[in-house]
Amino acid sequence: MYKVIRILKTCSFREKRISAYTSNMRFFSLSPFSRQADDFGVCFDIDGVISRGHVPFPEARTAYQLLMDHDRNIHIPSCFVTNSLGRNSCRAMQLTEWLGVTVNPEQMVLGQGPLEMYSEYHHKNCLIIGQGQLRQIAAELGFTNVYLMDEVMEAYPLLDASNHEKNTPLVALELNEKELPNIEALVLIGEPKHWECQLQILIDILLTNGKPSGKQNRVNYQTIPVIGCNVDLQYMHKAEFPRFGHGAFLLCLESLFKKLTGKDLEYSVLTGKPSEVTFRYAEHCLSNIAQNHGSFKPLKRMYMIGDNIDVDIAGANLYQRYINAAAENKNCALSASRQPPNNGIFLPQTVTEIYGILVKTGVSFASSGITHSHRDFTLDSDILKPHIILDNVLDAIQYIIKNES
Ligand SMILES: [Mg+2]
């Protein structure tokens, strides 16, 4: 407390900050959720809702702490549903710092998170595409036979001709060539560096039954499964304008494949918002958190707070359709890539209503009217309608408090 006061005294907006802090303390002493166990959960998008790039919004801390009990433990189950790539533990640590209370790794639903449920791929020879700690991320999801692009390039050094300055002698290439097992699945979990050579080699693998050696005949169709996580065409980062995301990389791959073969690239799995798979997984995570914190009430309602109509709001509304179809024992007409896995070990699906709350602090509030959704998602105008539009995440939580009172 003394440390906080000392910091506040040095602040040029001292009165304003003290007011915000005491207001925060008041929320702790008068918790808005007094019931022992509530039957709803809250999903937060991160970028554009909790933060902009690596800078958290000041109101996010107050908003999130309203979901805690008097001892700063989880009272209302919540999770963070983001399409970004990373390790759950690292993102949870970052959020803990930003929000001032402990965020646990099991509260993280990152783009690749639902792959944990697709055990049929876990023991195949998978080429993992992305950046960062890919081996650790893949291992945490359950993948056991992981290969990275560097290994493919080392085994087949003639495939990449995109760098004209690279001029390795042919003799050395033959000596260095080593055998890799057939790649049995492509797992695209995030945009890589150096797209041009990655695109070339992914196409080579797709058209050679996972074995892009010079001896292998090329075929004119897809022979191995492709798994894609995060279909965001753009995302908001530090720059004034949105940046190309993993969806842009996938679009390039799909376009090249179509141009070369005349056929559509087929995805076996697409995770990340707005996929129903990701919302089904988020519900599973919320139920798990509720049970771990002593609630035995099945969840009935979910709230998704997001800044992106195409993924956050569309995702919530698509999941509502999925839930409605399940309640009527009908199959929701989804592409195969969006179907939750039959053998996935999920907690029971109990939510009956999901509300998409759009906040104005991020990427697509001022929409141009052009949807940036992925090819496998047809988003009609009803799907793009938010339940409510609010200024920021604090307003969103206060709206939920009112709605649940
Ligand atoms: Mg966002």
Image (cartoon, helix red, strand yellow):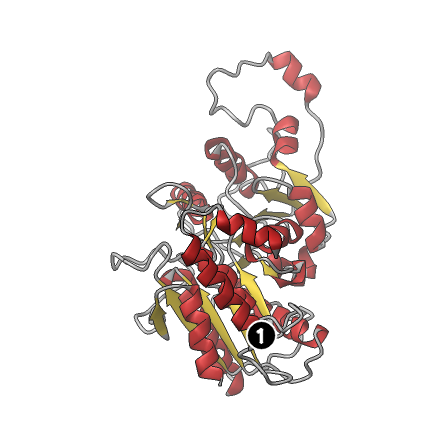
Give left or right: position of 66 versus 310: right
What is the x, y in percent for residue 372?
35, 55
In the image, taking residue 193 as reference, residue 146 lies left or right, namely right
Secondary structure, mark 1, is helix
- Report the residue marked by disc 1: 29
Question: Which residue corresponds to the image point at 61% horizontal and 54% vertical from the top-left?
Answer: 2
In this rendering, position of residue 365 left or right of residue 158: left
Residue 154 vs 51, above or below: the answer is above
Image location of residue 369, percent across then percent down: 25, 60
What quarter of the picture does the N terminus occupy?
bottom right
Foreground pick, 353 / 27? 27
Please name whichever residue, 137 or 208, is drawn nearer the observer in this view of the structure: 137
Instruction: Tell me: 232 left or right of 211.
Output: left
Residue 88, quarter of the rendered image: bottom right
Q: Position of residue 364 (x, y in %)?
A: 33, 57
Question: In this view of the protein, which residue sits in the foreground, 405 or 48?
Answer: 405
Q: Residues within 10 Å of mark 1 (few under 14, many from 20)?
A: few
Q: Quadrant of residue 402?
A: bottom left
Amino acid residing under circle 1: Ser
Question: Looking at the rendering, which quadrant does residue 360 occupy?
Answer: bottom left
Could you tell me which residue is drawn at 31 percent across and 58 percent down?
371
Q: Is residue 56 above or below residue 78?
A: above
Asked whether the viewer can see residue 125, the reply is: no
Question: Closer to the camera, 160 or 57?
Answer: 57
Q: Residue furthest bottom?
A: 328
User: Exactly how many numbered labels are in the figure?
Assistant: 1
